[in-house]
Amino acid sequence: MINGILRQYNALLLFIVAVLISGCDVRLPTVDGPESNDLLTQLHGYILIDKPKGGILAIELPSTKEIIIRKPWGEKNNPVDALSGPDNQGRIAFIDSGLGATNYSLKVIDLNTQKETEIFTRHGSSWPHETQNYGDSFSLSPTDGVVAFIINYKDDFSLIPNDYVNIGTLEIVKIKNGDVIKTDIKALDKGLSWFPDGKQLAYVALIRKDKLPNHLRTTFDDNFGREMTLWKSIPVTFLVDLTKMSSRPIHIGWNPIVSKDGSSILIQDYEGRIRLYKISSGESVSVNLPPAKQSHVFSFIGQDMLLYKGLPTKGSKQKFRLTSTFGTTPYWTLKVAQLNTGKFKTLIQYLDIHRRVSFGNGKIN
């Protein structure tokens, strides 16, 4: 009975706090409409979002049908700490771990059957103080069944004024048998993206400013990379061919996202500016999302559309969630935009910025 009273008291306390601070909500700026509803019919595949605690939700496109892939709050569920897929066989890769956990597991779950398979369990966590840990960057290849992620990273506070980056070792794991393809590549925990064949991977590493190759010393009209070029070491997107274990730098910037046909790579800078690098020609063109600097791109959808975290559209209702410190934080939106036309459409009106988001073509039987 005492526990029941305490639960009611806590619920009442949270309600009172929410009411008291409701007038202090910090609203997000908005982006002007109108939205383009016709974009939805051009989208095909599955958006994945993790759901507390340990759940995975798939949203089928273009129908927007929701499919529970992994039930939240399962008896053995830890939080989904990394998420990627589905690949062309309907496989979804994720890391099962949690706050204060001493082990983490790489697992695969099937989009169709929801059958879950453990690839490995290791000692470690996502915390930087652990000698064995893993970063946020995590990518399942569209084919070939290989996962790339960053392990054994350390915080580096010397690179960015008043900020830091994580630097670790790139590791590749085959989900079929758990075999590890070891590399000696030191990579920033700032994005990993596979080419369609599963043989090449885009990653980010540092080059000392005085060692920067001439072809990367480009000044862009949109000031892309302006802040990064002031640092003593500069983040650069590389391509690695895993069949030869050879890498080459292609463009200043981080958070690379390879297009679905592998012909181009989207790259962002410290301020969120975006450029599209065309691999065959080496041409780099500016990309503007509505608005660009406050967006985070998750994936290409098709050849010319981007899935991204965006601001609410003007006139839409904004919502806020209560934080652990009794403040509030606004929900963003999940949008899709067309590169050439600037058309956009909201797919999810209320997106918690802490959620893991992924997209893949998938395969439904």
Image (cartoon, rainbow, N blue to C red):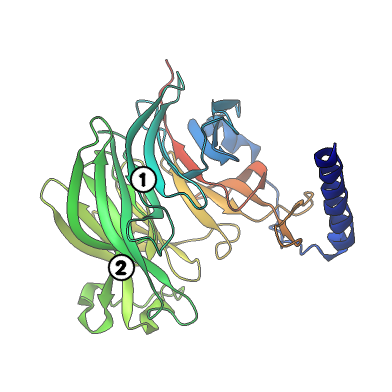
Identify the residue under disc 2. 236
Q: What residue is rendered at 61% in x and 35% in y?
A: 38
Q: Position of residue 33 (x, y in %)?
A: 70, 51
Q: Quadrant of residue 24?
A: bottom right
Q: State the mark number for residue 354.
A: none
Q: Nearer the viewer, residue 105 or 274?
A: 105
Q: State the mark number for residue 139.
A: 1
Q: Position of residue 272 (x, y in %)?
A: 50, 66
Give the amino acid at mark 2: Val
Which corner quadrant holds the C terminus?
top left
Assign a secondary structure to mark 1: strand
Is residue 283 visible to us here? no
Q: Nearer the viewer, residue 324 or 88?
A: 324
Nearer the viewer's eye, disc 1 or disc 2? Answer: 1
Q: Nearer the viewer, residue 300 or 285?
A: 300
Which corner quadrant holds the N terminus?
top right
